[in-house]
Amino acid sequence: MKLLFINIKELLQVRETSIEKLSGKEMKSLPSLNNAWLLVDNKTIIDYGSMDNLPELEVDETIDATGKMIMPTWCDSHTHLVYAGNRELEFGQRIKGMTYEEIASKGGGILNSAKTLQETSEEVIYEQSVVRLEEVMRLGTGAIEIKSGYGLTKEAELKMLRVIKKLKENYTLPIKATFLGAHALPSEYKEKKVEYIDYVINEILPEVAAQGLAEYIDIFCEKGYFTVEDTQKLLAAGKKYGLKPKIHVNQFNAIGGVQTGIENDALSVDHLEEMRPEDINSLKNSTTMPVALPGCSLFLSIPYTPGRKMIDAGLPLALATDFNPGSCPSGNMNLVVSLACIKMNLTPEEAINAATINGAYAMELSKTHGSITKGKIANLIVTKPIPSYTYLPYSFGSNNIDSVYINGKKLK
């Protein structure tokens, strides 16, 4: 089916040739085309241009986008969208003065979510996850990564990954799966971390690989969770099964996890709220994408990733939601883009680049998603009539999306 969008006020993120990612000063540029048309055939972007040069085309449907902008959908490269229940009681505890770490030490946090997930059927978890996935799609997300990590037993981790696999089968947007068995220490392994890492490596990982349930492997490299040595051991084991690293680092403390990720060719290092000069220097000239999660900083009242400093140092940067029940119960990429501008001092151009093409890179999707490029997949956001693209991060409390197209088909 051929779709023709006409009278587009501004077509954003137009790239004549496909690029992998943007770094440093490159992120300041957001190529666009005013008063444009866009041609989609089935699920592919075929052509575009100025309305002044619109050729005669035979199409199945013409959509008038007068006053509206069209851009690629958001690429959310870090989520925990598959989980059971919620943790609103902990939200109240934090308001009353308990820290995230204190709640976790008393059996809350990740262990709370793990207990709930272990007690919830696979069918119910899938149904809850469908609601969340469809919500974020309506909010403009057209590619997403989902982690396990709220299971912490072989049975529960595999259950989570099977739910992600079922989402992949039933939805047409790209969904990437990450095995995060080393998200926290289960209570029964509280004093036996070495034994738990061995359990993840020797008991769960081989089954994840045998069933083809994940593309990536992850670990929470942080004080009180897993050390740099644990991280090195797990990533080396994952490599043997062809699982690329995407790791949690520098959320509360900088302990060398960034360097370990780079040494292991990590696709991305995520969180980065605490960044030392040596961490920024280590990322220079690497292929690893730094990923900021400002929704988590907002919700936990912790520092924001120093995105301005990182981009000024010449680094690339991606933005993602960290959608999860404990530290960021929101999968709204529009809010993330706003927070990047308001709290991290990114320009609107940098934030949009970070949430589209660089987010695509952090899921190995740069060749097919993240920009308006001929031959790429037509995953598109059509905005409501807005004065400029700066209005998107500026109006942080409003939904400025008119419609979303996934593989060239309009979401209902």
Image (tube, rainbow, N blue to C red):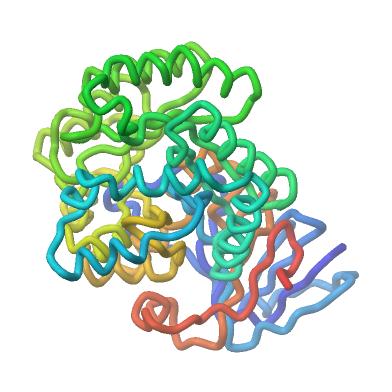
Rendered position, 317 above or below 217 = below
Residue furthest out toward the left = 277
Q: Is residue 19 visible?
A: no
Rendered position, 25 above or below 255 = below
Could you tell whether 268 is left or right of 82 in the image?
left
Please state which of residues 248 and 348 is positioned toward the viewer in this rendering: 248
Q: Is residue 184 visible?
A: yes
Q: Residue at x 37, y 54 (%)?
A: 319
Could you tell whether 211 is left or right of 201 in the image?
right
Coordinates of residue 181 in the picture (x, y in percent): 42, 30
Q: Residue at x 20, y 64 (%)?
A: 94
Could you tell whether 393 is left or right of 252 in the image?
right
Coordinates of residue 117 in the picture (x, y in percent): 50, 46
Coordinates of residue 104 in the picture (x, y in percent): 24, 47
Please state which of residues 341 and 284 is positioned toward the viewer in this rendering: 341
Please state which of residues 323 and 264 is positioned toward the viewer in this rendering: 323
Q: Residue at x 23, y 33 (%)?
A: 225
Looking at the figure, which quarter contains the N terminus? bottom right
Q: Residue at x 50, y 68 (%)?
A: 32
Could you tell whether 38 is left or right of 323 in the image?
right
Coordinates of residue 219 in the picture (x, y in percent): 34, 31
Total marks placed: 0
